Image (tube, grey):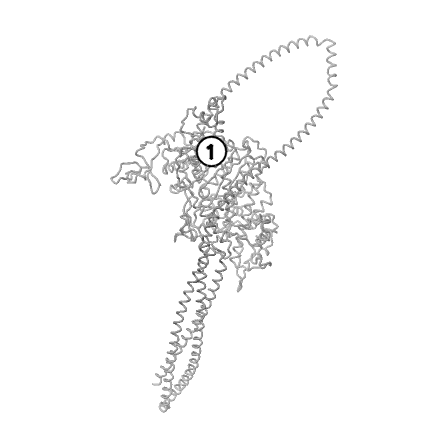
Amino acid sequence: MDMSELGEAATFLRTSEVELLLLQAKGFDEKKTCWIHDSKSAYVEAEVKGRGDDGKIIVETTDGKSLSVEEEEVQQMNPPQSEMTEDMSALTHLNEASVLHTLRRCYDHWMIYTYSGLLCVSINPYKCLPVYQKEVVAAYKGKRRSEAPPHIFGVANNAFQDMLHNQENQSVVFTGESGAGKTVNTKHIIQYFATIATMGQSREKPGTLEDQIKQVNPILEAFGSAKTLRNDNSSRFGKFIRMHFCARGKLSSADIDIYLLEKSRVIFQQPGERNYHIFYQILSGKKELRDTLLVSENPSDFHICCHGVVAVKSLDDAEQLLATDQAMDILGFLPEEKYGSYKLTGAIMHLGNMKFKQKPREEQVEADGTESADKAAFLMGINSSELVKGLIHPRIKVGNEYVTRGQNVEQVTCAVGALSKSIYERMFKWLVARINRALDAQLLRQSFIGILDITGFEILDYNSFEQLCINFTNEKLQQFFNQHMFVLEQEEYRKEGIDWIPIDFGLDLQACIDLIEKPMGIFFILEEECMFPQATDVTFKTKLFDNHFGKSVHFQRSRPDKKKKYEAHFELVHYAGVVPYNISGWLDKNKDLLNETVVATFQKSANRLLANLFENYVNTDSALQFGENKRKKGASFRTVASLYKENLNKLMINLKSTAPHFVRCINPNVNKMPGVMDPYLVLQQLRCNGVLEGARICREGFPNRMPFADFKQRYCILNPKAFPKSKFMSSRKAVEELLGSLEIDHTQYHLGMTKVFLKAGFLGQLEAMKDERLSQVFTLFQARMRGTLMRIKFRRNLAEKDALLLIQWNLRAFMTVKNWPWMRLFFKIKPLVKSAGTGKEVAGLKKECVQLQEALKKSESQREELKAKQVSLIREKNDLVLQLQAEQETLANAEEQCESLIKSKIQLEARVKALSARVEEEEEINSELTARGRKLEDECSELKKEIDDLETMLAKSEKEKRATEHKVKNLTEEVESLSEDISKLNREVKVVQEAHQQTLDDLHAEEEKLGNLSKANLKLEQQVDELEGALEQERKARMNCEREKRKLESDLKLNQETVAHLESSQLQLAEKLRKKEFEMSQMSSKVENEKGLVTQLRNMVTELQITTY
């Protein structure tokens, strides 16, 4: 390839010959030079010095360090001739160190694209490179991969040529973690297809299909991209773009399918991130637009826009808004559609500012100001009071009547957030549908090329339900890559009888996929929990651990880490790493319920766009009432997980129906620094993406294959004599004879049962030989044609000479007779004779012309009708093919589920038998517990009688206590009188002593009574201990029964009534025991009070004794 065709992009795509010679002139000793592991650079160059006494290899690094390493830690280095190689599968020594060195060397020279077998590896440069200009597009058009430097356009051209030659749908799959550059590559490859498919066509006016396709990206980026910690312009949704072409390669139309829009970002962003770009574009846009949307230019004024950062250095929001606005105009958006989407975006900002507060001394909630609600309602075309009333007092159906339900502040705030997310999600889907209508050019379709750009694998500080869906999608795509590159490849070798030793690359991800999507997997359990109103995050977590912890190596308990800000409930071992997940709110996210009162208000909105978005929303009651007749509308009530799985299955069916081309995007560093490569980060991505394994199987296997008939037709020109016309020869025999007659390396191909398999690069060699042969054929053809043309020209010259002589003779004769009188008369009469019939002839011709014009119009209209019918039939055929594939896949899944259900049924029947036996045992235990309950009731009645007797005794003691108190009072009065008159005390000593003696007698009597009460109290305490022991046993039995009940609920629902009866009897027994406990506690308190009174009496008597003596 002439590098001058690439213009200024040449230096960024291929090293100059001088620089390459300097790199390859380096001294090299294959036996001594090697790579060894390094803690900083992953691998460093070293020289082998020898072997130590312990058998280890002694090496010296380039910086002079001497190390002793194990032999398996040493990796061989490739010779300098492999420097800056454009295909890593061609490396002599294919190991991690060599691949990393090649990528690092290329990245240092800003060459971001490298081939690895059939893969293309792209490294994000984190800066703009001039490698996507129009001259680069033109240079790559029609070039074979081996003829041009590695580039994403090379992959695109291969897909385009394969589609034309093989008449087979193609796909380009971009994979990689967030920030690896998938979206940018997707944008450029779309522009490439749009450009090459319209080259040579006139550009009479703007707004062509090519322009429209190129203008899709600004809209999708504005509404679907946001700043994250790893990427300033991260796509927060996945897209599968189909570009349809006619049989001759002309672009016919395009359409887009979207997946997994991260709608939670609308109301919350993590620190360091921000909301979708469109919010900040509007706030930075024209003042007229801000005034229309009633917003300011400060993002901090809006709650949903200021959770993280509000500005990004690499993005100009005001300029991006102009691009978004222009893109909508080119795609044919009506003004009301464009400004309707802006109004809904502004309304979401105002909804986020709505505040609510609890009413004083009431459980009701009220709006804390109505300004934001008024602005949001104005933009949405609804009544503000209806909006607030619907949020605070939603109407729900109870039985056959509707009632209003009170809400607290948290519930209302969550309802507002759910409505905001739903509006944005539905608006984004409407935008995509509107774009698809604009890109449908109603032209003939033959094949398509699909471009897949899915949100990259994510391991964040806080990983929720959205991250599980994203990572599961990447898991499925990686499994699709592994199946296509390794499993299916080797399976085809086996079927075709190729001499091949199977290689296990250890990249099967099916166990992790089954853990998430199969019956009793994470999604299944989540769906099951969403069906139970009483289910919580705790019950969901319990079921997850009961079903998977210790049973699957991919499901692990979260490891405690004090450094982490967010709690993790469990961890999953994905292909790209271990991800901790937090399950808070998963049930609500999966249900995705909306305030139906407010939705009904939306449906009556004056904003046509908002009303259309919720037009097909049917509330739960209507869905249940109409049943199957409303199946399509009732689909809005399917859970998020079920819809996601359905869309993902359709995507995988689409991919499996195409010939895929894989592009592995690599993130060089997490700090978004241009030219900086983190070797360990790159190595981790290379290992996860299977880049080394892809290069190895490409080099050792047969990546190119072709049916015998196609190969014979395509390459028969290399030796036509190999196919004798006198006798029949099978296609396989013909290919064998053809390849055998060529001067090639015969180890580079292998003949299977139905196809010929070719080594990597051999197909390019055959193409070069074909081009050379065609050049010879055309040269010979041109020589013969030149000779033929010259002979024709010579004959024409001879004819012209004869004609010239004839004209000269006639001219001389005419000059002789032109003055004759009769000749003059002849000249005058001849025109008159001709004109007589000319009028009739002209009239006939005009009539014939009119008839021909009418026939032409009819044929044109018939042609247009047939063309339109052909387009519709082809579309219908394509739809039916996709539907058939989906049905076949569904049938296969149903058969697989049926088999699993049959196995489950057998297992459940066995478990039912076991559980039936256990139920019988439980019934026996229940009867025993009932008997014990009756016995306890009898004992409780006896205790009640004893308690009544004790209460009688206590009543008597209370009376005596009061009498004693009265006596003490009298004595106190007497003491006071004695203190007033000491003289009278001597004379009344005897009286006082007698009273004292009487008091002592009474005291002894009280002490005896107190002893009796203490004995009774001890007896009661012993009985209470016995009852508590019995109660503890009952509690344990009840806990066991409850545990068995939970297990029986999930496995055998038919036993629920029996278990419920058992629970009710246990609850009644426990309630009786609690009553007895309460009564015993009251008795204990009374006894304690009596003890306190006795203690007080003793103290008073002691004081009296002291006072008396």
Instruction: State the SS at label 1.
Output: helix
Looking at the picture, how far across and down is residue 937, in whole percent? 45, 70
Along the line of sight, the residue nearer the viewer: 135 or 1003: 1003
Mark 1 surroundings within 10 Å by alpha-carbon count, few (fewer than 14), some (14 through 19), many (20 or more): many
* Residue 942 placement (x, y as % from top left): 44, 73
What residue do we see at 69% from left, 26% from top?
A: 849
Query: Which residue is at the far top?
Result: 816
Quarter of the picture containing the N terminus is top left
Q: Amino acid at mark 1?
A: Gly
Q: Disc 1 designates what residue?
A: 154
Which residue is outermost to the left?
A: 53
Quadrant of the image occupied by residue 432: top right
Q: Nearer the viewer, residue 153 or 511?
A: 511
Q: Quadrant of the C terminus?
A: bottom left
The reply to whether residue 256 is visible in this rendering is: yes
484 to the left or right of 818: left
Look at the image and tell me whether residue 566 can be seen. no
Compared to 550, does 141 lie above or below? above
